[in-house]
Image (spheres, helix red, strand yellow):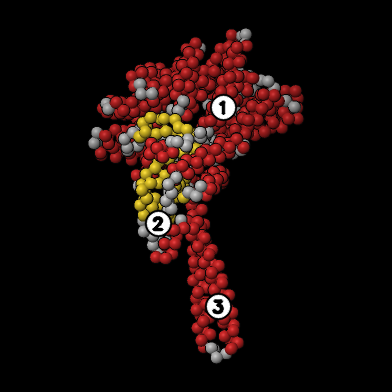
Amino acid sequence: MNIKSKIAVEFIASFVQKAFILGFFFIGTVYSQNNPSDLDSLEHIYMTGAFEQNDELYLLSEIVNKQEDLTEILKYSDLLIEKATKADSPQYLFTANLQKGNVYLNKSELSKALEYYQTAAKLASEAEENDRLALTNITIGGVYSDIGNYSISIDYYEEGISQLRDLIKITTLKTDLDKFEKYLAGALLNAGDVYIKTGDLEKALGYFYESSGLCKKTDYRLGSAYNLGNIGMVYAKQNKPKMAEANLQEAIKILEQEKDYYPISVYLNYISGIYVDLGQLELAKDYARRSLEIAKTYDLKNQRSEANLRLAKIYEKTNELSESLFHFKNYISTKDSINNIATIQKLANQRTAFEVSQKQSELDFEIQKRKNDKILTYGFLGGMILVSGLAFGLYRRTKFISKTNKLIDEEKKRSDNLLLNILPRDTADELKKSGKVVAKKYESVTVLFTDFEGFTKYAENSPPEKLVESVDLYFSEFDKIMEKYKLEKIKTIGDAYMCAAGLPEQTENHAELMAQAALDIIDFVKKSKQVHAVSDLRFNVRVGMHTGSVVAGVVGKNKFSYDIWGDTVNVASRIESSCEPGKISVSEDTYKLIKDYYRFEDRGEISIKNRSPLKMYYLYKK
């Protein structure tokens, strides 16, 4: 679940009373507590200069903290940075950088938000302001969670949680103890949410229980409700439906009393999913309808989309196809209004489109050039026939033909090389000879898919040129790995990379070669995250492999593309989708071929879309 924890708002509220506000996700809610007349008075005092010089930094920080207009916050924050730098005041520099981070977070400019949060964290660390440092680290963890970089998010959450635990151990004032325990409860709740996304359910459950205890101790009902709901969802993922529903129902009961409707809609939809899995479809409909009604009433677009999708699937199961279609159309229309899917896909495919179009354009150009050269040559030959009696003319014709043929041969080689960039050599030769390629069946081929974790989230929040540059870095290296092991790159589809071993030239050790290539891919991705700055776009990757029969051939008449088809391809894709980030998942068919050469972890039978469960393994180096 991705409910932004309102627990953070109230936990921060007491912190706002100091001169240095820490905007923790819900900065708009905090600002709304300010009195506009107070802000007007402060701005008037500053503009008229009716203050002591020693009070200028404090006055600017108060204006920054009370201001609601994002443009004005940036203006006064820049002014505060200028003045605080001259006065060498790290505490006011902290305030200004933090507030600028809040503004860019509010504007969904996440890379800029991170830049200023990182500066604020550094200032808090140098000043040994451990409470501010802890909460800033937790805020940074939340931003990385937003952009889908869960490994870095967890690092910051754990750092902030550790710092809060240390503060709780050494504090002697009860007011400080209560405050730090509330901060810790919020941090544990949000970190647990990230652990759910990474699949570490036991860690998430432990954090939710600890957070729940702290919420009860501090009498924070909303925090208790969120923890109950999250615990319920973990139990659902662990196939404990009764425990899941009990916790979710208790969470909904509290949230209804608190009039917090967004999580209610989320939890109702989740309970609906539990009853779908149990086969109790009428109950599932009731809960999904309740979720949809709340989403409509309070204009919760994400939940309207999810509830409509749930109902569409349930009605399809009950064979009420008109109702299913109605809700599916509503799902599509709502989803499109939230996010321009076509734009994201265009970004995701930008590298592939550029690569293919560039090769095709060069190929078309070279083919046309060859035709033009031939026309010139034939024309020249015709002219020579008319003046065949002239020895000088004959000499010039012979010399020109020789030179032209040499040019044609060179251009032919260039054209052939370009064709080999698109098609395997045997396939290219067949295409040049007969003008077509007959599809072939290969009985044993190993197919590999890779996919980047959280790519869509990155695509939404990153400049297109940055996104394409980052994906190109990975795919260029993957291409080198394919060349190293003489494997066949099939294509890239958005952020997915597809390749095969054992075709067009059949090899007995194709599974072993593909396994080694997969390990190289994982090693490169890990090294890339270590050597590049955190501000760069770096991903975790999932890798899936399966061995079986495929059909291979060329599609297209003007723009050729070598591709493979068959159940083996579909299974390989499904295996990749079920894999954890940073790991290589292989089918039992692949495992049998390479079990003596590598180390494996038995995953058991895993359910995949539109198929019976498959036995899978995680592949590691020996």
Classify mark 1: helix, strand or loop.
helix
Q: Visible in this render: residue 350?
A: no
Nearest the viewer among 366 and 280 is 366
Nearest the viewer among 357 and 426 is 426
Q: Amino acid at mark 2?
A: Val
> Residue 500 appears at what percent x and percent y?
44, 47
> Residue 32 appears at what percent x and percent y?
54, 25
Q: Which residue is mark 2?
A: 554
Classify mark 3: helix, strand or loop.
helix
What's the distance in space between the residues labelled 1 and 2, CA to CA? 47 Å
Q: Amino acid at mark 3?
A: Ile
List the single residue furthest toward the left: 319
Q: Which residue is mark 3?
A: 401
> Residue 467 appears at what percent x and percent y?
54, 43
Residue drawn at x 36%, y 56% as measured from the top left = 439
Q: Are marks 3 and 2 in contact (CB under 8 Å)?
A: no
Which label's residue is closer to the chain start, 1 or 3?
A: 1
Of circles 1 and 2, the one toward us is 2
Q: Which residue is mark 1?
A: 155
Q: Amino acid at mark 1?
A: Asp
List the single residue furthest toward the bottom: 389
What's the distance in space between the residues labelled 3 and 2, CA to CA? 36 Å
